[in-house]
Amino acid sequence: MAERAAARRPRSAAPTLRRERELLRSGHALVAGVDEVGRGALAGPVTVGVVVVELSTRSAPVGLRDSKLLSPAAREALVPALRRWAPGWAVGHASAAEVDALGILRALRLAGTRALHQLPALPAAALLDGDYDWLNRPHPPPPAHCAPLADGVDVVTQVKGDLRCAAVAAASVLAKVERDALMTGLDADHPGYGWAGNKGYSAPDHLAALRELGPSAQHRRSWRLPGVAAAGQAALAEQLDLLGALEPGAGPEREPRGSGEALGARGA
């Protein structure tokens, strides 16, 4: 079904390194494309991919597109070529429990920071998909258990970066393939929710299972989950507010107004 859906999507022009090369020629020795997946899922981690390019990096492998425009088979086939092509790459995760404790934006930042710190050297600039710099903003004191933020990395946002910028599109593919594999593995440990197919998003089978089975340890319990009593949600909110009061910067962080994201939104 996913393959048929991908086939019905309109063809798009291949992303290029034009924007990345502009940043490289402006004095940045290394530029990373950054993209996330799992932001709107009900279960599992939020995942951030990072792909580094330099001025000598050639055009991206044939077939590269934003991960949402590719079938699962096409994404998986691209991974070895992307790993050979990029001078550096990494994928970082923040768990469902960390999403609950920190809020989605700080969890994204934590996953991105984890990915960046896997690289042999931090890039001078990060080209971030979208119009909001969740990688560095806002700037509260980070919780003690979080890795330090990516100080010294110049974050540049790019609307539709996953469609236009090859490094960002490559990051989206690597992140999507790794998170999909992780959710398929978790499906075996938590049967009944259909994660091998829906990857933790709000598909009908997942929603029905939540109403029947209730949430698992991999669900984001601070979100509006079907089958979870409002009283339980309120109690959890109180616990998370207390966490934020005890540890500055650790409370849930909300989406910026106008971001277009909604809790439980269906994802690719």
Image (cartoon, grey):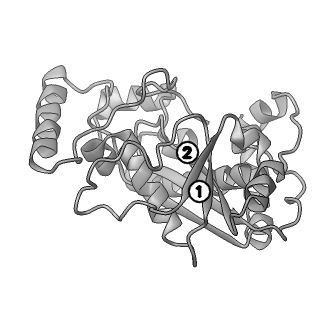
Which residue is the site of mark 2? 37
Q: Are marks 2 and 1 in contact (CB under 8 Å)?
A: yes
Q: Is residue 79 above or below residue 14?
A: below
Q: Determine the secondary structure under disc 2.
A: strand
Residue 217 in view of the camera: no
Asked whether residue 214 appears in the rendered view, the answer is yes
Q: Earlier in the sequence, mark 2 or mark 1?
A: 2
Tell me which residue sits at (85%, 59%) in the image: 60
Q: Give the secondary structure at mark 1.
A: strand
Q: Is residue 90 left or right of residue 148?
A: right
Quadrant of the drawing holding the N terminus: top right
| Circle 1 residues within 10 Å: few <14, some 14–19, many ≥20 | many
Q: Which quarter of the figure is the C terminus placed in?
A: top right
Q: Quarter-wise, where is residue 239 in the image? A: top left
Q: Is residue 145 found left or right of 135 in the rendered image?
A: left
Residue bearing mark 1:
49
Q: Position of residue 135 (x, y in %)?
A: 47, 49
Whole-percent x and y of residue 65?
79, 45
Give the camera-side residue of 18 and 263: 18
| Frontmost residue, 158 versus 88 | 158
Spot occupied by residue 42 in the image (x, y as percentages of width and height)? 41, 36
**Hey, what amino acid is under mark 2?**
Val
